[in-house]
Amino acid sequence: MKEKVQKFDSKKEVQKNSEQEKNKKKIKSVKIKGYVPYKINAGKAIP
Amino acid sequence: MPEKPYLKMTPEDLREIYFHENHFKSGFDEHFSENSLNAFFHYISIGTCKRFPNSPLVEAKRAAQLIGQKIDRPVLCLSGGLDSEAMAMAFIEAGVVFTAALMNLDNGLNEYDISAARYFCKKNSIAYTEIHVPALRLLEKGLHLDMAEKYRTLSPERALFIYFLQQLEGNPILAGEILRKEKSNGQVSLCCPKDRDLCYWRYFMDQKIAAVPYFHFYTPELAVSFMAHTSVKDEEKENTDWQGQHQAFYLHKLKVYQEGGFAIQDNPHRTQKWHGFEGLKKKYDAQYDSVEAYNRAYRAPLELHPEYDLNQILLIDENDSIANRILNKSE
């Protein structure tokens, strides 16, 4: 179990670091050719 | 073990079953590709409405009939909540024969939850099975981590639900939720399936199981029917406080289903219903004398909120004048 958590944490770290560089949280608008975009509520975890 | 003919189906055949005419798409770019690492957006898209939707009940009945034509042994997964009960009512009214499956956590930890489903099945003479899910033992073994890696579940509860699906015989049918408006942190936006909610779909695809991962989006017309015909389009309900707003949220949802034509009634067994895992968390917390014990053990390792979770977009074909009119009216 401990090994599984460590493995998972290391993957999370890779993802977190690379994403922190290129974004500043929420995007206000988006344009995709051929579509009308609608914003969906932000994801949240079940408590 | 009975033969499972759908195991011989191609992925293309199965896609026609998951959503009618494979209309529903999900992915991380406008081509709906499935590479999650560093994804900045998550997109979903529903197919073009071919006509203005009928009432939600009529559209749900049509969806049930379409499913009945494609699937041999529908097993409706009933949680005891309104969404799955409404789905079951649509199947009953459509005359599609089905059985039900109920998830029974650690010898009754969600008894308050499934008792509503059991009551519904008995009242409507629906054959059902209860599947025992040894939740604490599975989580201690790291099921939440394994499932997060395979299917992007991002929660211990979804991992347990996949375990439940693994035990089912037949073709699982999951209700999901209706397309509606939701107010979160002061902002009103549409409530649609998010990437994490589609983990069951990924599981079905991976295991080549003929199933329905999200009934309330089975056809484009059903998906937008509640926004077209009920007060879900113009009433906003906070859904951020899972405890505090529970009753108001529940009553609003009940009203919306009734407006949609469902003869759904309040059920005394459902009064404590929220998501069905409260008892599990409480038991674990009590064991370690901390209200954060469960979250620390099983949620914290999954806690990262991917950026695409914050930037989720529903794409509607710009030529779909019906869906755009319905959704724009509600803006």
Image (cartoon, coloured by chain):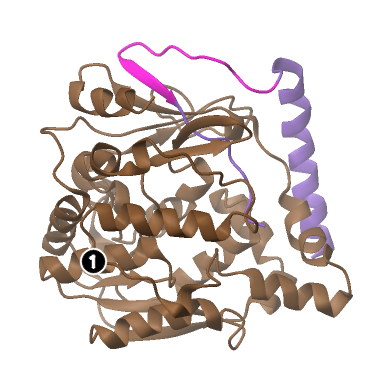
Chain colours: A purple, B brown
Q: What residue sits 38% from the left and 77% below the top?
A: B101
Q: Name the magenta segment's main secondary structure.
A: loop
Residue at the limit of the structure toward the right, as seen here? B289
Q: Nearer the viewer, residue A29 or B254?
A: B254
Q: What residue sits 82% from the left and 52% below the top?
A: A6
Q: Which residues are magenta?
A: A25-38
Residue A34 part of the magenta-drawn span: yes
Q: Quadrant of the N terminus of chain B?
A: bottom left
Residue B109: x and y in percent read 62, 81
* Location of residue B223 by image quarter: top left
Q: Residues within 10 Å of mark 1 (few under 14, many from 20)?
A: few
Q: Is residue B266 visible?
A: yes
The answer for which chain carries disc 1 is: B
Residue B282 part of the magenta-drawn span: no
Q: Is residue B5 above or below residue B191?
A: below
Q: Is residue B26 above or below residue B254?
A: above
Q: What residue sits 36% from the left and 65% below the top?
A: B84
Residue B21: x and y in percent read 18, 42
Q: Amino acid at mark 1?
A: Ala
Residue B47: x and y in percent read 24, 33
From the viewer's perspective, is B266 left or right of B161? left
Q: Is residue A43 above or below residue B215?
A: above
Q: What residue sits 54% from the left and 83% below the top?
A: B111
From the viewer's perspective, is B82 left or right of B137? left
Q: Secondary structure at mark 1?
A: loop
Q: Nearer the viewer, residue B147 or B288?
A: B288
From the viewer's perspective, is B107 left or right of B220? right
Report the number of numbered marks. 1
Q: Is residue B176 visible?
A: no
Q: Quadrant of the C terminus of chain B?
A: top left
Residue named by callout 1: B263
